[in-house]
């Protein structure tokens, strides 16, 4: 069954950075705590961000406020897809329709850096959005360690240290 991304793009005012993931995780329709990007109970993203910025992010509102202060937008590279094995693994996403709204998002904002949530996302972006790399050569492309617990070659503590090194400071 073809799924359409349920969240759209988050674009705060004065956005200078863009965080790109792949596609929403399975379970958004059944888990009441999964109300925004990376809120799957398995994803380590918000735990990492809480440690990086020494904040508690218990609500969607608090996450939006933090990312607005940081001038970080959030989007996924996939707009629609099907799941081969009915799970959230990126490798099981098929019949992909790319998020072409990224074109306008980059053209209408002064993005200086794009953060990828995994090497998978970076590779797909470089392949399917290479025209944007050519059009915006000044945008720095940075790959973060995957917040997926399946990416076990780094501990949560090591991932946090790397995110702290790479992400912007709060103004």
Image: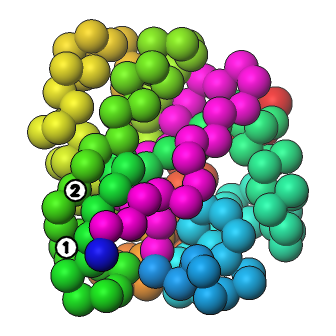
Seen in the picture, residue 41 relative to 3 is either above or below; the reply is below
Is any part of residue 122 visible from this angle? Answer: no
- Measure the C-alpha gap from mark 2 to mark 1: 11 Å
Residues marked 2 and 1 touching at CB (< 8 Å): no
Q: Secondary structure at mark 2?
A: strand
Measured from the top left, where is residue 11 in percent x and y? 65, 33
Residue drawn at 67 percent across, 77 percent down? 34
Other-residue count near label 1 (Cα within 10 Å), few / some / many at <14 / 14–19 / ≥20 = few
* 71 relative position to 24: left or right: right
Q: Secondary structure at mark 1?
A: helix
Residue drawn at 81 percent across, 30 percent down? 171
Measured from the top left, where is residue 120 in percent x and y? 23, 59
- Residue of label 2: 96
Residue drawn at 47 percent across, 57 percent down? 5
Measured from the top left, where is residue 90 in percent x and y? 27, 70
- Residue of label 1: 91
* 3 relative position to 162: left or right: left
Residue 41 occupies quadrant: bottom right
- Residue that protrudes farthest toward the left in the picture: 127
Magenta region, main secondary structure: loop
Seen in the picture, residue 34 relative to 42 is either above or below; the reply is above
> Which of 40 and 156 lies nearest the eye of the viewer?
40
Q: Foreground mark, 2 or 1? A: 2
* 29 relative position to 57: left or right: left
- Between disc 2 and disc 1, whose residue precedes? 1
Residue 3 included in the magenta stretch of the image: yes
> Which of 5 and 62 lies nearest the eye of the viewer?
5
Q: Which residues are magenta?
A: 2-25
Other-residue count near label 2 (Cα within 10 Å), few / some / many at <14 / 14–19 / ≥20 = some
Seen in the picture, residue 29 relative to 130 is either above or below; the reply is below
- Which label is found at residue 9? none
């Amino acid at each position: 069954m073809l799924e359409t991304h349920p969240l759209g793009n988050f674009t705060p005012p004065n956005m200078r950075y863009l965080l790109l993931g792949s596609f929403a995780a399975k379970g958004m329709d059944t888990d009441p705590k999964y109300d925004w990007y990376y809120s799957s109970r398995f994803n380590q993203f918000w735990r990492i961000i809480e440690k990086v910025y020494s904040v508690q992010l218990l609500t969607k509102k608090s996450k939006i406020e933090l990312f607005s202060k940081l001038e970080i937008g959030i989007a996924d590279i996939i707009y629609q897809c099907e799941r081969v094995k009915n799970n959230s693994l990126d490798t099981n996403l098929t019949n992909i329709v790319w998020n072409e709204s990224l074109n306008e998002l980059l053209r209408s904002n002064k993005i200086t850096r794009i953060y990828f949530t995994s090497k998978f996302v970076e590779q797909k972006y470089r392949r399917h959005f290479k025209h944007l790399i050519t059009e915006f050569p000044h945008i720095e492309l940075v790959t973060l360690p995957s917040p997926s617990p399946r990416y076990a070659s780094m501990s949560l503590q090591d991932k946090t240290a790397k995110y702290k090194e790479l992400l912007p400071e709060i103004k």
